[in-house]
Amino acid sequence: MAWLRNDEQDIGQTIAEARRAYQEGHEIFVSRLRVKPENMRAWAVPDAADLIEGVERQGWQLSHMSENLIGDAFPLMTCIFRRH
């Protein structure tokens, strides 16, 4: 069972985890990105782009993405990556 992490994790840590998972031979890598209200802009989510580009540079390819709301205001993006 996977649990949603309550701690803050920066994009660099997530990319490092993607690199490690790739090196360990995993076939799938899942990342969640919570967009903070102060970073929200109409139609632009630069943190999501930075995360996706960084993980793909580690040898992964974005396979699926979904977006949910936490409570009433916090968008949560779940990205599923597969090995190239």
Image (tube, rainbow, N blue to C red):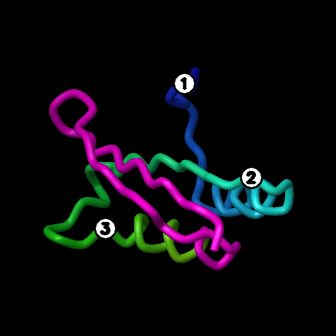
Q: At 39% across and 46% down in the image, what residue appears?
A: 34
Q: Tell me which label, 2 or 3, sits earlier in the chain.
A: 2
Discs 1, 3 touching: Cβ within 8 Å: no
Q: Which of marks 2 and 1 is nearer the N terminus?
A: 1
- Eye-nearest disc, 1 or 3: 1
Q: Name the residue under label 3.
A: 45
Query: Is 45 inside the magenta-drawn segment?
Result: no
Disc 2 marks which residue?
26
Residue extending furthest toward the right = 24
- Marker disc for residue 78: none
Q: Distance between the residues labelled 2 and 1?
A: 19 Å
2 and 3 marks in contact (CB < 8 Å) = no
**How far apart are labels 1 and 3 at the CA level?**
24 Å
Query: Residue 5's spot in the image, x, y percent?
Result: 55, 31
**Which residue is painted at 81% across and 57% down in the image?**
25
Q: Which of 26 and 44 is in front in this view?
A: 26
Q: Give the range drawn in magenta.
A: 55-84
- Quadrant where the C terminus sits is bottom right
Asked if the magenta segment contains residue 65, the reply would be yes
